Amino acid sequence: MAGLDGFALRRWRKAGVFGADAVRRVERLLTDLRDTRSNDATAPDWALQVLARCLEGDPVAQLPSAVRALLEHGDPHEVVTAMAVVHEAGLPWLTPQGQTRLEHLMGSELTFVPREMRPTLTEDASGAFAAQYSLRHDGLAGLSPTLCARILPWAPVGIVDDLIDGGVVTKDGKPWKARSDAWERDYLRARLAPEQVDQETAETLGWQEYLRRRSFLDGEHADAVDGEAADLAGENGGETDDDVYGLLERAAEGDVGAIKGLEYLLPRYLVLRLRQIRDGALTGSWPAEIVADRGLWRLMAALWEPKAAVSPRRSTFHALSALRHAYDSICAGDLKRARAQVELLVGHVQADPGQRAEAWNMSAYLALLDENLDGALAALGQIGEDSPRTAHNRELLERRRTRARNDRTHPSNPYLELGLPHQSPFWKQRYRDLRREFADDREEAARLNRAMRRIQQAEQQEDLSDFFVLPLDADAFRLPDDLPVTLVPPVEPLPRRTAPRHPDDVETVRRRALADLLPTLLNAPRRPDHQHRTTS
């Protein structure tokens, strides 16, 4: 090669190679192609023969066609290497359009390719040139659906992610169907149509956000905030580091402090629903879809403090709230409010049987406090099922009616006077707390002391027969433990896991575009003009 003379250089011009440096570059390229293709059954014999003839010192005009034929069956890396030689050596092997395209693909500077110079849909069969051009010019959003359909089957996942972020690939086109790899199909479906993903797929993808949501809906709640976190929450104005599902769990338990955190994490339309829940507590009125979500009842009950008797006819939630309101009023000693509420409850004929029994039992207790024993017995008679506790109350009333008024014990249940259900094991602690609270109220202190002595005496004698049992069944007053499903945000698309415009992905697209550019090689070199680059 070092001894190239003018005669040899003139012979190489027939093959479209001008200048000693260009000849050396081409000879190295041809040698590499010959060595890698000599045992390749798919390599055309005529092309190998042309390479051999050129390397033996007899270059011919068919060289560009031979190189193209070998590269069409070669590795994309070989295409890049060959096109780099064509570009850097300034070989006139390309059409004017091919030269412009090659300059764009191989040049380091950003170049503009006129529309008339860009490949047609037939030439750009895979859409690689259009994809590469759009990547370099930030024009992915302008790609047509036809081009996207060509790009999807082969492009690196990172490029597909770029197309998704550019808004040109959407779930309507179901792009995952174009991929052959199962993981990639699942990944693209999770990115675009997360509602179609199942738990097994999410586990395969390692999609923790989906799995966290699924475990929450399956009732596998996160652990409650521990003491240290609770102390920290107090210092930070009630905020904790809970995720949205931890906060939803707290809301389901009736923790109004979770509302503030949820307002930061929930999507806008759910924040508006959350505010409807909070605002509805001002009047005790909520939209039907909110009332229908039993998982919200604890939060609604915690927010709402009824100012008057609640109509149980409004909804099942209001019926339960009315029952609880009547019981709380009895425990608070507000008998006037309790009577008003119980009157509405016993008039609610469509009530749940268990709640209806509790309402009549409270009616009987209020009548007992007035020493209206006949009225109390009549109220118990409205209870359909005669449970052991109902029978106990009836026997207490019958026994009390046989005694002279002055011989009767105090009619109240002392547990209820302490604000606890009948026979609660926590009465001593409750008594001590109330005594501290009313330390300066002599009348209230006397009432509390009387209740304490009655409980002590009854427990010592192991005889609670003079205490009216209320409630009959505490479960009738219990709020449901359901999840607040109407506040659970929808499945969000899986965030992309590839780097935008990753160099390796861009290089893959460029190689594909170069391979598609091969048909623009001529069968014979064109004559260089005065503007053509040559290397001497």
Image: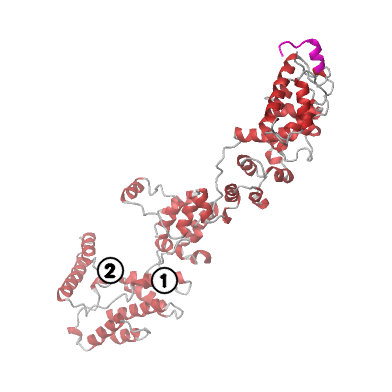
Q: Is residue 489 magenta?
A: no
Whole-percent x, y for residue 103 in the image: 73, 26
- Tell me, for residue 320, which label it has, or none: 1
Quadrant (top left/top right/bottom left/bottom right) for the C terminus? top right
> Compared with residue 275, is residue 61 higher up or lower down, i.e. above or below?
above
Q: Could you tell me which secondary element the residue under label 2 belongs to?
A: loop
Tag 2 or tag 1, which sits nearer the N-term? 1
Quadrant (top left/top right/bottom left/bottom right) for the N terminus? top right
Q: Is residue 309 visible?
A: no
The answer for how far apart the CA atoms under marks 1 and 2 are is 18 Å
Amino acid carrying mark 2 in the image: Leu
Within 10 Å of disc 2 (Cα), the crowding (few <14, some 14-19, many 20+) is many
Residue topped by disc 2: 420
**Location of residue 36 by image quarter:** top right
> Compared with residue 507, is residue 352 higher up or lower down, i.e. above or below?
below
Whole-percent x, y for residue 524 in the image: 83, 26
Q: Could you tell me which secondary element the residue under label 1 belongs to?
A: helix
State the residue at coordinates (50%, 67%): 292
Figure coloring:
secondary structure
Range of magenta residues: 1-11
Q: Nearer the viewer, residue 19 or 189?
A: 19
- Tell me, for residue 220, which label it has, or none: none
Q: Nearer the viewer, residue 148 or 473?
A: 148
Q: Is residue 432 left or right of residue 389?
A: left
Q: Is residue 10 left or right of residue 71?
A: right
Extreme residue in the bottom direction: 402
Q: Nearer the viewer, residue 87 or 226?
A: 87
State the residue at coordinates (31%, 51%): 227
Q: Is residue 110 left or right of residue 270?
A: right
Amino acid carrying mark 1 in the image: Leu
State the residue at coordinates (69%, 21%): 28
Q: Is residue 505 visible?
A: yes
